[in-house]
């Protein structure tokens, strides 16, 4: 086995580069469907899918849950001084990214670099880590899909970051966001993400929601202005989530966020980062959230994972549901595919999955799921009568009075007169069963 490692130690010695072996292979650490160079509709799978692995779940979280401590032990987590530990973690991360064959990664400031005792110390440490990351990016060809700041874990953020009732906490969050934007620019990041970790409330009784949302908007405008001034050309992304950790989060779902961005003059610079599990929590499907974004021209990127239909929390499981992947890919392909975004696996192995190989298996499964989803969705959109069936339902708007209405040429009196003249409309079938059968036909053939 040829050794691939960054720095002076191999952290995953039992795993080599993950090969594509096709659906007949029974090697659990080989791709069955993700063939990076396979061309689908004029683009390779790698270009369509733009896969990314995340730093936080894979290299920072170790299996602890509210009822028990960590279950996973990491070889890169043994050094006693925090900067040596950060360096080892980075070597392990880049070894993992390279062996998996993802072109992108994502990180929060605090995943990569420890929190210092002052703003200045935290900034200095982050800059040092960014220097190492830049070297490793050059060495491996890895690129940064997005950076972000963790302004929700530290105790100071218990009442929110930009929506905190205490201005001093807001300023601390600003310091972190500034440093994380600088880091993202330095590493050539294509996007910068805001997930509103604790931007919401636990009790409405003690919360001025109007002021908090105004402050959030002002904060985002200020961050955008700073980043643009520093030359950031990428896309800002908001990641909706309706709840958890707060009872109610302001970035509830795609439609709420789109309205907020438009209301606050942010729609030209910001798009959305849709996470599948957050859609589930909001009572929506993954495809619904993607569709709301594409309708608004605001689909930025995707946090690929899966929730659990019976649980009400963010389980962040690896995406294996092919039906969801097909529908999601149909929406994405109809929108022309990703521009600056990609599929970032915001997913973690289960607490009980304690073998180092399990994190490879999780990502391999997720990458195969969307690769197959891409092929099926492309087939449906190009070779079936799906699009024709759908547009037929709206055929009455294509000409005559329907087209006049779309063009704004009819007033309410005109509409009334048309109704009176035409009489009761003939019932028109929604044909849902035919649509569902068509999807299954293409999935199962
Ligand atoms: C948490 C979010 C988080 C963001 C990045 O639920 O998904 O991981 O993606 O801050
Ligand atoms: Ni996420
Ligand atoms: Ni999440």
Image: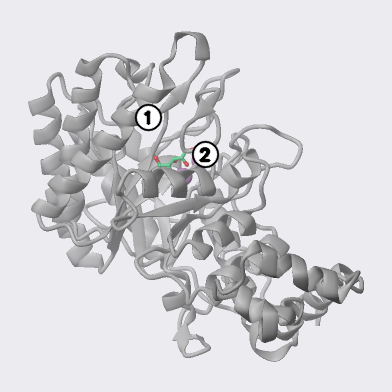
Q: Is residue 41 visible?
A: yes
Report the disc number at residue 241. 2
x then y, percent, for residue 445:
81, 83
Q: Is residue 26 depicted above or below 116 in this figure?
A: below
Please name whichever residue, 11 or 414, is drawn nearer the observer in this view of the structure. Answer: 414
Q: Is residue 436 visible?
A: no
x then y, percent, for residue 266:
31, 49
| Residue furthest out toward the top | 206
Left or right: 106 with respect to 407? left
Which quadrant of the view contains residue 137?
Answer: bottom left
Which quadrant of the view contains residue 26?
Answer: bottom right
Please name whichever residue, 21 or 389, is drawn nearer the observer in this view of the structure. Answer: 389
Q: Is mark 2 within 8 Å of ligand 1?
A: yes
Q: Is residue 439 depicted above or below 292 in this figure?
A: below
Left or right: 132 with respect to 280? left
Pointer 2: residues within 10 angstroms few (<14), some, or many (20+)?
many
x then y, percent, for residue 109:
26, 39
The quarter in which the N terminus is drawn is bottom left
Q: CA distance from mark 2 to mark 1?
A: 15 Å
- The quarter of the rendering in which ligand 1 is drawn is top left
Q: Is mark 1 within 8 Å of ligand 1?
A: no
Mark with earlier residue (2, 1): 1
Residue topped by disc 1: 213
Q: Report the residue at 22% width, 52% height from top.
A: 8
């Amino acid at each position: 086995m040829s050794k691939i490692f960054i720095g002076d130690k191999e952290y995953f010695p039992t795993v080599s580069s993950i090969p594509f072996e096709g659906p007949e292979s029974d090697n659990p650490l080989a791709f069955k469907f993700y063939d990076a160079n396979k061309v689908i509709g004029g683009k390779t799978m790698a270009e369509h899918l733009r896969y990314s692995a995340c730093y936080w779940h894979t290299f920072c979280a170790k299996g602890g849950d509210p009822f028990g401590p960590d279950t996973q032990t990491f070889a890169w987590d043994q050094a006693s001084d925090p900067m040596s530990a950060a360096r080892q973690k980075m070597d392990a991360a880049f070894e993992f990214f390279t062996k998996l064959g993802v072109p992108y990664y994502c990180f929060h400031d605090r995943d990569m670099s420890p929190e210092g005792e002052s703003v200045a110390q935290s900034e200095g440490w982050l800059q040092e880590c960014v220097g190492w990351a830049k070297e490793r990016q050059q060495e491996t060809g890895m690129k940064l899909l997005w950076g972000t700041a963790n302004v929700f874990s530290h105790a100071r953020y218990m009442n929110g970051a930009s929506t905190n009732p205490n201005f001093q906490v807001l300023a601390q969050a600003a310091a972190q966001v500034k440093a994380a934007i600088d880091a993202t620019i330095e590493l050539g990041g294509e996007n910068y993400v805001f997930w509103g970790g604790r931007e919401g409330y636990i009790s409405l009784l003690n919360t001025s929601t109007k002021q908090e949302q105004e402050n959030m908007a002002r904060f985002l405008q200020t961050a955008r202005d700073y980043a643009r001034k520093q030359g950031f050309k990428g896309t800002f992304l908001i990641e909706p989530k309706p709840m958890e950790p707060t009872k109610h989060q302001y970035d509830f779902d795609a439609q709420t966020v789109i309205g907020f961005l438009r209301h606050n003059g942010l729609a030209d610079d910001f798009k959305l980062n849709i996470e599948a599990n957050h859609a589930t929590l909001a009572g929506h499907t993954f495809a619904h959230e993607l569709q709301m974004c594409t309708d608004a021209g605001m689909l930025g990127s995707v946090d690929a994972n899966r929730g659990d239909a019976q649980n009400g929390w963010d389980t962040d499981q690896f995406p294996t549901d092919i039906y969801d992947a097909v529908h999601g890919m149909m929406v994405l392909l109809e929108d022309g595919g990703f521009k600056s975004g990609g599929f970032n696996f915001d997913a973690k192995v289960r607490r009980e999955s304690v073998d180092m190989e399990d994190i490879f298996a999780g990502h391999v499964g997720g990458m195969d799921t969307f690769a197959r989803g891409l092929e099926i969705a492309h087939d449906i959109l190009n070779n079936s009568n799906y699009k024709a069936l759908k547009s037929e339902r709206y055929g009455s708007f294509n000409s005559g009075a329907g087209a006049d209405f779309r063009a704004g040429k009819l007033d309410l009196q005109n509409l009334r007169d048309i109704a009176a003249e035409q009489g009761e409309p003939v019932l028109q079938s929604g044909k849902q069963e035919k649509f569902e059968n068509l999807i299954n036909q293409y999935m199962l053939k």
